[in-house]
Amino acid sequence: MVTVMKNGHVGLSVDKHYYSVPFRFIGKKVKILYTSTQVEIFFRYERIAVHARNQRKYQYTTINEHLASAHRYLSDWTADKFIEQGKVIHADVAAYICKVIDGKSHPEQAYKSCSGILSLARKVGTQRLINACRRANQYGIYNYPIIVQILDKKLDVFSPESEHINAMPDHDNIRGGDYYQ
């Protein structure tokens, strides 16, 4: 038994994969039954969705007709809301949130990541989150796990200039490139 997330998906915890359900079930408790090849989702003994099982972690399997954006969005989660929350923190965070949303075929698939990224400001502080978003943007990777990884490894506190290897020092023992011709 799981609750349908605000993005209209349920997570199969065994595979850490997400499957869509019709948007009218957002916030409802549903039952997931699965085999090695199929995932079925039930609400009060009525099957509301069937998907081929996919075991790729942190990915989404979505049927377009299930999404609220195809109708009208019932949740308080919207792309504009996450972008506005990012702007409150800093323009770089808002720009990063935009890239996370743009990276998904359906905006609803990015909402959980956006929520997670924005919540990190409370845990690590706004300046560290801003720096982490800048760093991840330099990498060209737009998701929640890279932000967490940058923060865990404290890569946000190092400036990119300090990471470059210094030039080889002059020394009598160093032969140089001309020696090996």
Image: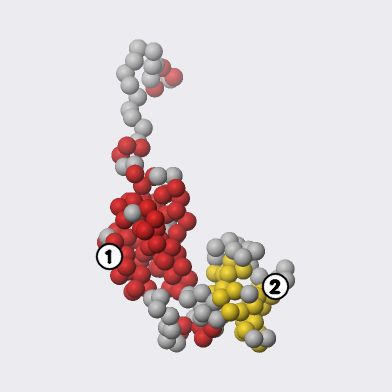
Q: Position of residue 29 (x, y in %)?
A: 58, 79
Viewer-closest of 62 and 113: 113
Q: Which mark is residue 88?
A: 1
Coloring applied to the structure: secondary structure
Residue 90 visible in the current orientation = yes
As drawn, is 114 to the left or to the right of 40? left
Please tell me how crowded label 2 is: few (under 14), some (14-19), or many (20+) other residues with Cα within 10 Å.
Answer: some
The count of marks equals 2
Please tell me how crowded label 1 is: few (under 14), some (14-19), or many (20+) other residues with Cα within 10 Å.
Answer: few
Q: Position of residue 135 (x, y in %)?
A: 36, 50
Quadrant location of the C terminus in the rendered image: top left
Residue 138 visible in the current orientation = no
Q: Disc 2 or 1, which lies upstream in sequence?
A: 2
In the picture as drawn, the residue positioned furthest to the front comes out as 122
Q: Are marks 2 and 1 in contact (CB under 8 Å)?
A: no
- Reading the image, the residue beneath label 2 is 34
Viewer-closest of 12 and 166: 12
Under mark 2, the amino acid is Tyr
Residue at figure coordinates x 33%, y 54% from the top left: 125
Residue 86 picture quarter: bottom left
Q: Which mark is residue 137?
A: none
Quadrant location of the N terminus in the rendered image: bottom right
| Separation of residues labelled 2 and 1 (CA atoms) | 42 Å
Q: Secondary structure at mark 2?
A: strand
Closest to the camera, between mark 2 and mark 1, is 1
Q: Position of residue 158 (x, y in %)?
A: 34, 42
Residue at figure coordinates x 39%, y 55% from the top left: 123
Under mark 1, the amino acid is Val
Q: Is residue 56 above or below residue 165?
A: below
Q: Position of residue 129 (x, y in %)?
A: 35, 54
